[in-house]
Image: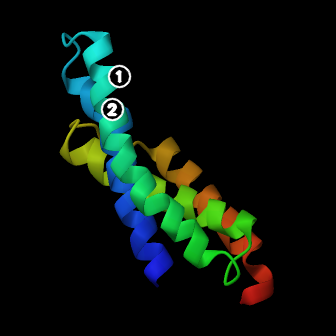
């Protein structure tokens, strides 16, 4: 559970670093890059321990798949709340396919 919580924290920072600047398109690109890297440092402070702690309980492939699904959940909330975008039907179907991939990746542990 600790790994999952750290990955959630990591992905919150990652999403802000990668997409938060989209509301500020007039900001100078260099400024945005530097600020994004500063935020990304916080992401690494959660991501690296999450992988270190989780490896062994999960394989590296499983850790990556967990991280991607968490990324999608975090991004879904962020895009709706912060960017004001809505989820379209094809995005929802794509998301379901990814959840199917997760199920398949963990099939041996079910």
Where does the image place residue 51, in percent across and percent down from the top left?
58, 67
Residue in the image at 75% along x and 70% along y: 105
Q: Which residue is mark 1?
A: 33
Q: How many residues crowd mark 2 within 10 Å: few (<14), some (14–19), many (20+)?
A: many
Looking at the picture, tell me which residue is in the foreground, 84 or 93: 84
Where does the image place residue 67, in percent across and percent down from the top left?
54, 60
Looking at the picture, tell me which residue is in the foreground, 43 or 8: 43
Residue in the image at 33% along x and 54% along y: 12
Is residue 100 at all visible to an observer of this figure?
no
Q: Which residue is mark 2?
A: 36
Is 30 placed left or right of 100 in the picture?
Answer: left
Q: Can you tell which quarter of the image residue 46 is in?
A: bottom left
Where does the image place residue 13, in percent across and percent down from the top left?
33, 50
Instruction: Say above or below: 90 vs 42.
Output: above
Where does the image place residue 90, in percent across and percent down from the top left?
52, 42
Per the model, the C-alpha gap separating discs 2 and 1 is 5 Å
Q: Quick one: SS at disc 2?
A: helix
Q: How many residues crowd mark 1 within 10 Å: few (<14), some (14–19), many (20+)?
A: some
Instruction: Say above or below: 1 vs 72.
Output: below
Is 23 placed left or right of 90 in the picture?
Answer: left
- Which of the numbered marks, if any, corresponds to residue 66? none
Residue in the image at 31% along x and 12% along y: 29
Residue in the image at 45% along x and 52% along y: 44
């Amino acid at each position: 559970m600790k790994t999952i919580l750290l990955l959630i924290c990591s992905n919150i920072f990652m999403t802000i670093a990668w997409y938060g600047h989209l509301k500020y398109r007039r900001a100078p690109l260099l400024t945005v890059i530097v600020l994004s890297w500063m935020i990304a440092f916080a992401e690494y402070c959660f991501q690296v321990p999450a992988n270190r702690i989780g490896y062994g309980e999960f394989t590296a492939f499983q850790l990556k798949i967990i991280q991607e699904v968490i990324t999608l959940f975090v991004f879904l909330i962020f895009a709706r709340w912060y960017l004001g975008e809505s989820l379209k039907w094809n995005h929802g179907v794509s998301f379901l396919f990814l959840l199917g991939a997760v199920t398949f990746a963990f099939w041996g542990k079910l």
